[in-house]
Image: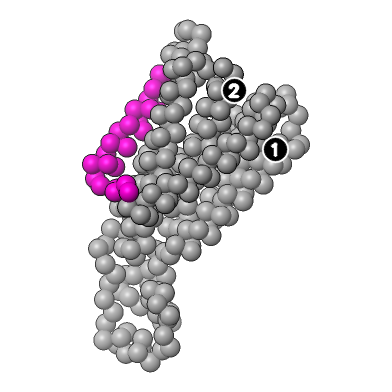
Amino acid sequence: MASNPVLNKLKSAPGVAAPSRPAPSAEQLEQMYRQPSYGGTGYPPAAPAGQRDGGWGGAPARYMSLDDVIARTGAMLAMVFAAGAVTWALTPAGMAGALIMIGAMGGLALGLYMTFKMRVNAATALIYSALEGLALGGISKIFEARFPGIVVQALTGTVMVAAGMLIVYRIGAIRVTPRFTRMVVGATFGVFGLMVVNLIAYLFHPGGLGLRSGGAIAILFSILCIVLAAFNLVIDFDVIEQGIRRGADQKFAWYASFGLMVTLVWLYIELLRLLGYMRSN
């Protein structure tokens, strides 16, 4: 999230910050001329024997594409749904809390590791998705037991918000400028700081600061979180697009998908909370 610190780190990663792809040598141009057309894919030619960089003087063997990000995001979403469905179907109501704790803590630890070490591959990304699915399956089961039909509403809302922000981004209604990014990042960190303070306040006062107590303050706070998550999605889309334009290595597609998943999970949970508050009143 932040505008997602996950995706913000992608901007400074090797192969992303370069303003353009390296120019091939005369020998490589000759090789490209003799080979069939690549159909406009933008991928560099196959690496000669003994070379790991595709023969482009440090360029990746293949550049990240939008299809790469879509495929990996789809795989992570499928894992979240599968783990969540299994948790929902096989977990007794009394065990949901324990599974939520295991999934949430495990997902947080692995997510922090992937964010700051920038080591995201198929294995770590899918394990993270399974842990998130474990937590979300338990959370969703608890909400559904109290408010029948709320999970479908929250899922529908998540899809609609994500699709809407993608359309807004594509038509240029919101421009991701440095100032916009700073504002969203600052507000996001401020909100998470309030969450931590509210959690600590629970130890000394019932309901803490009232941010999750279900009253008017809680409703306004959840709306604020949903708005911030939506703006984070816009920044996520922009970082992915910039990574593709700047020639990020294909391996960063898992990293970009992981960052997008963090925001989507936050958005879904906040929608669940808001719908629960509204049904309680």
Magenta stretch encompasses residue 133: no
Q: Residue 25's spot in the image, x, y percent?
A: 27, 82
How many residues crowd around disc 1 within 10 Å: few (fewer than 14), some, or many (20 or more)? Answer: many
Q: Disc 2 marks which residue?
A: 279
Name the residue: 47% across, 58% down: 69
Dividing the picture into quadrants, the one containing residue 14 is bottom left
Q: Which residues are magenta?
A: 173-198
Name the residue: 41% across, 89% down: 35
User: From what the image shows, is residue 59 above or below residue 145?
Assistant: below
Specify which label sits upstream in the sequence, 1 or 2: 1
Identify the residue at the far top of this view.
205
Q: Is residue 43 left or right of residue 97?
A: left
Give the residue type that dot 1 points to: Thr
Give the residue type that dot 2 points to: Arg
Magenta stretch encompasses residue 183: yes
Name the residue: 44% across, 28% down: 223
Q: CA distance from mark 1 to mark 2?
A: 25 Å
Q: Is residue 129 left or right of residue 10?
A: right
Dot in front, 1 or 2: 2
Dividing the picture into quadrants, the one containing residue 220 is top left
